[in-house]
Every structure is written in structure tokens, then in C-alpha cells.
Image (cartoon, helix red, strand yellow):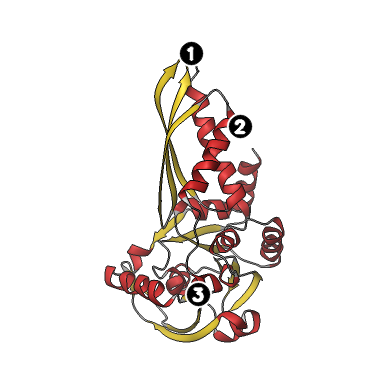
Amino acid sequence: MLKVINDVFWFWRGVRVFALVGGSGTGKSFRAKLVAQKFGIDLIIDDGLLIKGEAIIGGRSAKREKLYMAAVKTALFHEKAHRDEIARALQKQRWKRILLIGTSEKMVNKIAERLQIPHPHKVIKIEDIASRQEIDKAIQSRRVEGKHVIPVPAIEIKRNYPRIFYDSIRVFLQRNLGRTALRTPKLYEKSVVRPEFAKRGRVAISESALSQMVIHCVDEFDDSIRITKITVRSDSQGYRLTVVIELPFGTQLSGNIHNLQQYIIDNIERFTGILIEEVNLVVDRFSK
């Protein structure tokens, strides 16, 4: 009910939320200003930062974190103080359109929920605005050199995050975005940074640790449910789990399985900050 009231409030204000999604290192931040210019977007949320025009007006960058998992939590506004800071900054600004940048629709929806703004009404995929060759080149650069882009001028990064600043690039945007051409091409400066976690290499949660968390969640939810197998897969959008279970004979399936599914997702995401893209529960058999 509160979410409905909140969405009505933003709709009444004429606010529209956009999202740009794509895998890690595919060039989303590099093209953020291109999307903002085409759709007349006032503000950008990117990796924990609130950006207006050429300035950072709130938040803190996930790219300053020393560990990858901490960076994920920052990008998802895991800490209440971080969320509150952005909420206050949003209240002070006069804006109608905002762009959320993330690796998946689930990620941008979670950001929207945590910042108490509506889910994106328009989702733009990186494949819609960049060629396969451009995406592959960006991924290669990220993999080999560990370089990340923040869509603000170098002076902003040098002032706020001097220790991770690497270089700056200037881009003259004069190209089509989908089927629509930009009306007024502009020169934008972007900052190239090398986060501490990029220097150390990506640190992700181990399959063993994640499996133990699932076992704990299931046992806490209902200790009569037995797990017979757990499969963990991960990609740029998050983790995908398949959990094979054995249920006591007579267990009511309809709402119970869905509740267990959500319980696993909510608890793992809350305690680790990682994104669980999906949890598939497979009932292997019923036991007496």
C-alpha cells in the first residue's frame, strides 16, 4: 500500500524514471550522457553517485571501495545513511527525469525501491545503443586494464576521489541513438578511474559460502525441509541458484515454496549485498 501511495506521489509530480542496463564493463557509464541528452534526463544514479550535469551532488562512489563486495553494496545503496543522503539530495533538486544505471533490471528496480522512487518505466539495454564490437572492446579494456568510467569531468573526480583517478577523455556526441538522431551534439568529458578492487582483482563470494547460506536459510525457514543438491551459477547480472529439496509428506506447496524462495533471496541479498537473480526450487521427492 505504501509503495502505491509513493508511486502516485511521484507520478503526480510528473517524475519519470529511466534505466540503462548491461553487463559489467560493457560501457554503460561511458554512454550515460548520450542517453540523458536524448531523453532530456536531469539526474543520473551511477555506482552510488547522484550526478547532475557535470557535477556530483550526492552519494559516494562504489569505485572507491577496496573490495569488490563492498563496491556492490555501495552501488546498491545497502547502507541506510547512504540512501538517506541521496533522498535528501533528491528533495533539494527540481527534477522530472532520472536515469538509473545497473547490470540488470533487477538491480535498477532494487535501487529504485531503496531510494523510494518508482521502478523505471523505460529500460534501455546497452545492446540498443552500442554495437557488438564496441561492447566487446569495452569488456576487453575492463578485463585487461581494470579501467572504469565515471560520467563527470576530471576536476570532479580529482576533488572527491584523487587516489583512484587515472585519466580523462573527451567525447563529442554526434551519432544516432536507436532510430533518433541527437539534435544538438555536445562535447562531454568523462573520467577514467582505477578502483582499488580492480587492482586486486574481482573478489566474489565462493560457491561453498553461498551454499552454506542457502542451507542456513532453509533450516531457519523450516527445519523439516532437506536439501539434496545446490547448484550455483553467476554472470554479470547476478547469481542463479538451483536448490533441490526433499519435503515431508503432506506439505502444502502453493504459498510455502514461493515464501521460501523469497526468504532465501531476501536474506542473502541483505547480508552480502550481492544480487540473487533467481532461485529455482526443485522438489525431488516427499518423505514420510
Tag 3 near tag 2, CB within 8 Å: no
Kindly identify which residue carries mark 2: 220
**Up-down relation of residue 265 to residue 17 (above or below):** above
Comparing 156 with 128, the one in front is 156
Element at label 2: helix
For badge 3, the amino acid type reads Lys
Q: Nearer the viewer, mark 1 or mark 2?
A: 2
Check the picture and name the quadrant holding the N terminus: top right
Pick whichever of labels 1 and 2 is earlier in the sequence: 2
Going from N to C along the chain, the mark reached first, 1 or 3, is 3
- Give the mark nearest the N terminus, 3 or 2: 3
Residue that badge 1 annotates = 250
Graded by Cα atoms within 10 Å as few (under 14), some (14 to 19) or many (20 or more), the crowding at tag 1 reads few
Mark 2 closeness class: few <14, some 14–19, many ≥20 residues within 10 Å = few
Q: CA distance from mark 3 to mark 2?
A: 38 Å
Q: Position of residue 49 (x, y in %)?
A: 60, 68
Q: Is residue 287 above or below residue 238?
A: above
The answer to whether the residues at label 1 and label 3 have Cβ atoms under 8 Å apart is no
Q: Residue furthest front?
A: 208
Taking the spot 57% from the left edge, 62% from the top edge, the residue there is: 75
At 71% from the left and 66% from the top, the residue drawn is 92
Above or below residue 190? Residue 47 is above
Task: Report the residue marked by disc 3.
Answer: 199
Residue 125 or 219: which is nearer the viewer? 219
The residue that appears at 58% across and 26% down in the rendered structure is 222
Tell me if mark 3 has few (under 14), some (14-19) or many (20+) residues whose alpha carbon lies within 10 angstroms of its own.
Answer: few
